[in-house]
Image (cartoon, rainbow, N blue to C red):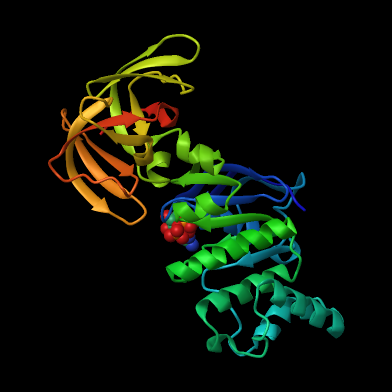
Amino acid sequence: MATVEVRDLRKRYQDFLALDGVSLKAESGQLVTLLGPSGCGKSTTLRCLAGFLEANGGEITVDGESILGTPANRRGFGVVFQNYALFPHMTVAENIGYGLKLQKLPKAEIETRVHDVMKLVRLDGLRDRLPRAISGGQQQRVALARALVLKPKLLLLDEPLANLDARLRDEVRWLIRDLQQQSGITAFYVTHDQSEAMAMSDMVAVMKAGRVAQFATPREIYQKPIERYVADFTGEANFIPCQSVIPMGDGRYEIKAAGAKLELSGVPGIAGPAELLLRPEALELTSPSAGTFAGKVTKSAFLGAALHCEITLQDGSVLKLTAPPNHQVAPGEEVGIAIDHSHAWLMPEVAP
Ligand code: ATP
């Protein structure tokens, strides 16, 4: 298996700098996700890894050796795209075995390996079908099988689930993660879907305009984002400007925000204006007098598994809150909001 390191990668398209110093690392057997909005450079990074694009600067190493001089077809990587790119005139089995045939392996070995990988991705029974005669989810599994059958050193997946409907996306997502973990293949995965990134990855690189804004575990990215951009991109979030942040020693801070005073520990010290990050599930409805904040319910929606509310505080700021589904509140009701302090986080404030 392979440890892969990308250091200060730069890529220019004519006069547009698409990658402006991307650095990240996949330890052997890890799945690393590149997450970010359209145009931030995810696919460009993946294409440089694959060898389809030549970088203008920086370094990519596999187990410490540079691969920048190695052509794509000699890197030994498996690549899976969103549009499958199957050969339409070849059967499922022929599509999967094509790469092995190019390697001129004996027919019997090709047969066995294709058979085994089809079982692994649960395609048995479909070997003689043409791609047009199977579903989108099955086509994506053929694309996955075609990459895995070559026993690649590194698996590169570019939005592989984008063309599948929500239910199938879930199913194939678990399958990919299962296979990747079972086989211990190091993998890079491109997506703009934060829940996909959180569910599948060992590490997430949140990308912003050709750079990595934060590279950390899904839990850290969600609970301890270094800036508002990362917090916003990884889930629902409330940001409350702090009037003051006073260090009290031992890593504790006294914070005044939205007319309330609270004490936090384990948060970073921020030089300059700061804001509180409170995820909706870190807030709890209480009686109006019992909470840290008090306000009025301005929206409430029952979503089956949870109740989503919006509470407008006395200073006019609006907080999103997720409550258990058995709670019942109606717009106009006065409520209090308690904060789970272990889930409050401090970040530099972004000017509006
Ligand atoms: P998406 O999710 O939309 O695929 P992405 O994050 O994968 O986006 P890239 O495809 O890496 O983004 O593109 C990064 C930037 O480089 C974009 O602004 C894009 O318009 C630009 N770009 C990509 N390919 C080319 C090209 N061949 N020529 C010029 N500019 C390009």
Is 130 on the left or on the right of 208, as rendered? right
Is 181 on the left or on the right of 110, as rendered? left
Which is more toward the observer, 232 or 301? 301
Q: Is residue 58 above or below residue 82?
A: above
Residue at 37% across, 40% down = 281
Q: Quadrant of residue 58?
A: top right
Q: Is residue 264 above or below residue 56?
A: above
Q: Position of residue 92 (x, y in %)?
A: 65, 84
Q: Is residue 60 above or below residue 131?
A: above
Work out whether residue 85 can be spotted.
Answer: no
Outermost front residue: 326
Which is more toward the observer, 224 or 292? 292
Is 342 on the left or on the right of 125, as rendered? left
Q: Position of residue 38 (x, y in %)?
A: 41, 56
Residue at 68% across, 65% down = 78
Residue at 69% across, 52% down = 68
Outermost left residue: 332
Is 313 on the left or on the right of 92, as rendered? left
